[in-house]
Image (cartoon, rainbow, N blue to C red):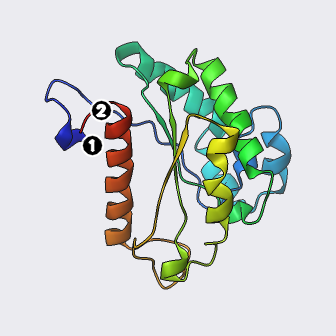
Amino acid sequence: LVSNLPPHIKVGLVNVSIGGCKIELFEKDTFQSYVATAPKWMTNTIATYSGNPYQHLVDMAKLAQRDGVIRGILLHQGESNTNDQEWPNKVKGIYDNLLRDLNLKAADVPLIVGELVNADQNGACAGMNRIISELPKTIPTAHVVSSAGCEGRKDRLHFTLAGYRELGRRYGEKMLSLLGYP
């Protein structure tokens, strides 16, 4: 992405990530019930976000807005919600809250969503990619990035370094096209 943008354009990232969590952890009004039952190893990570990852994301995004413009939201999640048919609606609720809390318009801030380790890599949760692919029906400004061919680790849940790099390149290509760059 950066190497294909004009040099005067700077790109910043706000990263809030908690491995192994369900999407429910980012539901603005109900995350507490998820935290109450989360395993200790996860609650330690949640604590680094003052116990509220969603609010931390909003606070960091507001800081970013002081000097910049939010042009997109990237989501890579789903392993812990495998086969959850309500996942698209849950993501829509979070996306809508982010737009509202950050005073953004969906037309200006697409949601870029990556697939999980693909079936072609024997991904343990590859079936979730079918649900992920349905997200644009729930969120018209959502765009799904394929993980086909992105090398997966032997654990069948994570990508190898090469797989992550390829998926990242695809995220960048998608964002470039949405910004109107070739």
- State the image coordinates of residue 20 (x, y, percent, origin top left): 64, 62
Residue 12 occupies quadrant: top left
Asked which secondary structure carries label 2, the reply is loop
Q: Which residue is drawn at 68% across and 28% down?
A: 96
Mark 1, residue position: 1
Of tags 2 and 1, which is closer to the observer?
Answer: 1
Where is 137 relative to 5, above or below? below
- Of 60 and 121, nearer the camera is 121
Asked which secondary structure carries label 1, the reply is loop
As measured in the structure, the alpha-carbon distance from the residue carrying label 2 to the one carrying label 1 is 9 Å
- Of 135 and 39, nearer the camera is 135
Q: Which of marks 2 and 1 is nearer the N terminus?
A: 1
- State the image coordinates of residue 50 (x, y, percent, origin top left): 64, 37
Q: How crowded is mark 1: few (under 14 residues within 10 Å), some or many (20 or more)?
A: some
Residue 51 appears in the picture as rendered: no
Residue type at the position of mark 1:
Leu
Q: How crowded is mark 2: few (under 14 residues within 10 Å), some or many (20 or more)?
A: few
- State the image coordinates of residue 172 (x, y, percent, origin top left): 33, 46
Mark 2, residue position: 11
Q: In this view, does 26 lie to the left or right of 17?
A: right
Where is 145 relative to 111, above or below? below
Q: Residue at x 63, y 39 (%)?
A: 53
Check the picture and name the quadrant holding the N terminus.
top left
- State the image coordinates of residue 166 (x, y, percent, origin top left): 33, 63
Q: In this view, does 53 lie to the left or right of 40?
A: left
The outermost residue toward the left is 7
Residue 66 appears in the picture as rendered: yes
Where is 44 relative to 63, above or below? below
Circles 2, 1 touching at the beta carbon (< 8 Å): yes
